[in-house]
Image (cartoon, rainbow, N blue to C red):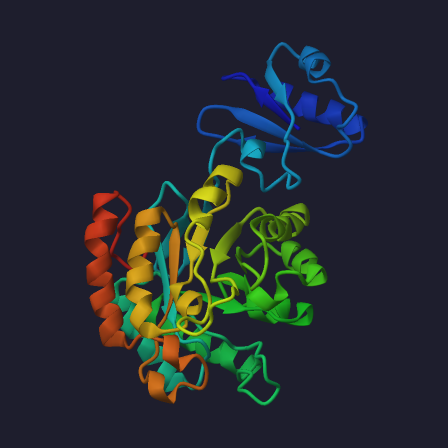
Amino acid sequence: MIVVMKIGSPEAEIARISSELETWGLTPEKIVGKHKVVIGLVGDTADLDPLQMEEISPWIEQVLRVEQPFKRASREFRHGEASEVAIPTPNGTVWIGEHHPVAVIAGPCSVENEEMIVETARRVKAAGAHFLRGGAYKPRTSPYAFQGHGESALGLLAAAREATGLGIITEVMDAVDIEKIAEVADVLQVGARNMHNFSLLKKIGCQDKPVLLKRGMSATIEEWVMAAEYILAAGNPNVILCERGIRTFDREYARNTLDLSAIPVLRSLTHLPIAIDPSHGTGRAEYVPAMSMAALAAGADALMIEVHPNPAKALSDGPQSLTPDRFDRLMTELSPIGTTIGRWHRSAAVMV
């Protein structure tokens, strides 16, 4: 349920209404929009009469029910307005959301050594990326596959951040690692295999770094957004949804099926920013450019693209990784599309 306040409502009145609603056993959350303030209400609202609630104050314009099972993530919860995530980096603050230039995240699947990760960071920054992605801890299907270097790789990511000023995005697999990863990372990633790890979602929602939540391999859109709801309900409002392909019946020609229809669907259902990972979505480097351009045209707020200096020798996901030279060309190819739709900013960060 949401309480829509009239334009110009006094702060003291908004605070008074929130305090009164707390006595009803509800949890009010003030949401400041471009023109109005909305008070989102979480709790047992089934028996409440919206018309009677409007009588609490003459400053209340309207009381509406949120029909979706996901409350905080629902677009209705923000009275139709999109949210945005501000991410401070050494190069400046990068904003991710539908009213901002598209953010580009690039880098290898896993951090292999310092020379490799620093050089890759320099190349993707020069091409226009805003963030470096790289796995310190890697979930793998086989227990014998490379699992990442763990804590030592965090130091290598920190070195790349210092050398380039790029923001860092890396995955959290275990709740016990959240604190030490958050010391290095600007965005914490929850991978597809952990989308339904509710204990991890709750814990990661209790810290204040932004979270990039990947869609599970067989998750419906509702299940995915409900996973985001866990993070939001724990207190962290800065969630970015990332479509990375779902498992369907045809896996001969592509690793997964990249669901670009999720972009307009999510845009109608949720206020959260939307990222697309065409690398995992296809599993083949030759398909990544086309899917990147399609995602940009379809309205993605961010792109996550795997880049490796020598994909043939990559310790993980080499077949879907672009070389730095191919990434350079891709950024040039994306520019006309992004410029046409008014969402392209080629510098390394949007400075504020």
Determine whether 63 is above or below 174 in the image. above
Q: Is residue 157 visible?
A: yes
- Residue at 66% over, 12% down: 57
The spot of residue 79 in percent (x, y) is: 53, 29
Q: Quadrant of residue 49?
A: top right
- Quadrant into which the N terminus falls: top right
Q: Is 186 on the left or on the right of 338, as rendered? A: right
Q: Is 335 on the left or on the right of 88, as rendered? A: left
Q: Is 210 on the left or on the right of 101, as rendered? A: right
In front of the other: 295 or 1: 295
Disc tally is: 0
Q: Is residue 184 visible?
A: no
Determine whether 176 is above or below 198 in the image. below
Q: Is 279 on the left or on the right of 329, as rendered? A: right
- Residue at 37% over, 59% down: 303
The spot of residue 127 in percent (x, y) is: 24, 66
The spot of residue 66 in percent (x, y) is: 63, 31
The spot of residue 137 in percent (x, y) is: 56, 77
Determine whether 172 is above or below 58 in the image. below
In front of the other: 61 or 90: 61
